[in-house]
Amino acid sequence: MTAAAVPAASPASTGEQSGVRLARSRRNAELSLLLLAMVLVAAYAAMVEAKALDTITSDFWIPAAALGLVFLGLHLVIRWLAPYADPALLPAVALLNGIGVGFLRRYDLAKAAPAEREDLAIFAGTGGRQLAWTLAAVVLAAGLLAVMRDHRSLSRYAYTLGLAGIVLVMIPAMLPSRFSEINGAKLWIIVPGLGQIQPGEFAKLALLTFFAYYLVRKREVLSLASRRVLGIDFPRGRDLGPVLVVWIVSLLVLIFEKDLGTSLLYFGMFVVTLYIATERVSWLLIGLILFFGGAYLAYVLGSTVGGPFANFYDRAQIWLDPFAEPYDRGYQLVQGLLTLGTGGLFGAGPGGGQPTLLPEVQTDFIFAGIGEEIGLFGLSALLVIYLLIVERGLRAALAVRDSFGKLLAGGLAFTLGLQVFVIVGGISKLIPLTGQTTPFLSAGGSSLMANWLLIAVLLRVSDGARRPVTGGGGPAARPAGGPPEQLHGAQTEVIRP
């Protein structure tokens, strides 16, 4: 056969083959990074035992291997269901999750009697439970990827999810304190004998989906400006209604759930999503003024003994001067600051700290407990990993072709970053202490499952953003059952008024 007789490849088939090669390359890069993350987790476990036990047991590698199998299963699901998804998300989250399990295992060793430490079962204690919760969370994330083949299908259930989010937020506030309050904050549903659930972790995902849907429909109205001050366009007065409603709700959370961090999280993610939708800096300024004004008002009113803001006032007083009562109200924050100071730049080494001296080190103060052992440099590395996850989420938001996906991914990425800021700011005395957990590190099933669901949504959005277009210039085929096209916008739409 002559060269002239060879049929030329069509543009569509060439593009399809290129897309397949690109997807395979990304998944292979994800697998390599995932294996590297599990090697680091195993090395961390070995160093913990070497320091805490003066020996390395023969089964130190089992938790890392179990985590590796779980994450490998999710990798295979992603390879099958979301082949174009961002390859850096899963390895970064797996590394954080693995270090969290390793530190909780180290906490179990510290609590055990010296004679019992070498015989402490791998799957026992807080670390063992966290392993089980990780399995459940990863299975839940894989299930979401299987059910949600297109992120835009979430918009069909926006109002239902919004209502569910409000109910989840309200439940702890409505329950008696003995069933919802821990350390002064009413954020949990406490089931005697079974543990506690933090419904707000799931509420943030449901509410953010509703915010994204609402703002896609209303962004043109909310982008209208009535006056320009110092080069900044401010919205019309009658358009302030949604922000004022969410502001009032956040104050109610502050009053009844007694937690500044949760209030800041809900209000912050709405205002930032509103900014992404409208590109109006004025919304950020209005949001900051409303939030800090409300917080100051709560502090002033909280000085009244027995008032609804009394708990917030006490927390603010501890934040302003924790060393005024270092063995009473300020004990936890003082111990956290001393723990961070003890770690210094390089830390005492994995297994070399004293986590039992720090109250709630397995949940609220896990970042300080880890910091004592890996130092400022190690904590900086963990923060860079969080920053990488947030950056990849924002990159997916920029690249995805529909408006709903842009708001959803951008809001999720910001929410994760804000949650890290709230907890790290609390233990470092930058802001008052909160009841938030450190994503993927802290012990707890509800936090772990909710954050893995967040990552699953980001994976799905990034898969849609990176999926190649067909040879005719249109997008790749969309699964049936998606929402109406008017919610999606043009395929290359930029969110502008």
Image (cartoon, rainbow, N blue to C red):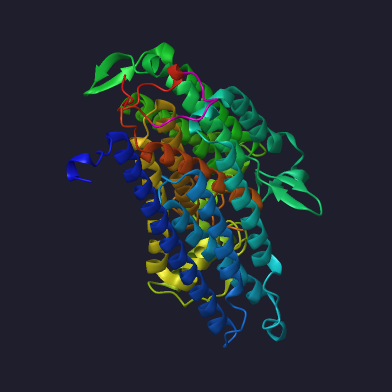
Q: Main secondary structure of the magenta part?
A: loop
**In magenta segment, residue 363:** no
Q: Residue furthest right?
A: 193
Q: Quadrant of the C terminus?
A: top left
Q: Magenta span covers which residues?
A: 476-484
Q: Is residue 398 left or right of residue 444?
A: left
**In magenta segment, residue 483:** yes
Q: Give the camera-side residue of 312 and 47.
A: 47
Q: Is residue 146 left or right of residue 377?
A: right
Residue at 57% of width from left, 88% of height from top? Answer: 54
Q: Position of residue 431 (x, y in %)?
A: 46, 48
Image-quadrant location for residue 52: bottom right
Q: Is residue 321 above or below residue 306?
A: below
Q: Give the camera-side residue of 271 and 401.
A: 401
In the rendered image, is residue 438 in sight?
Answer: no
Residue at 30% of width from left, 28% of height from top? Answer: 473
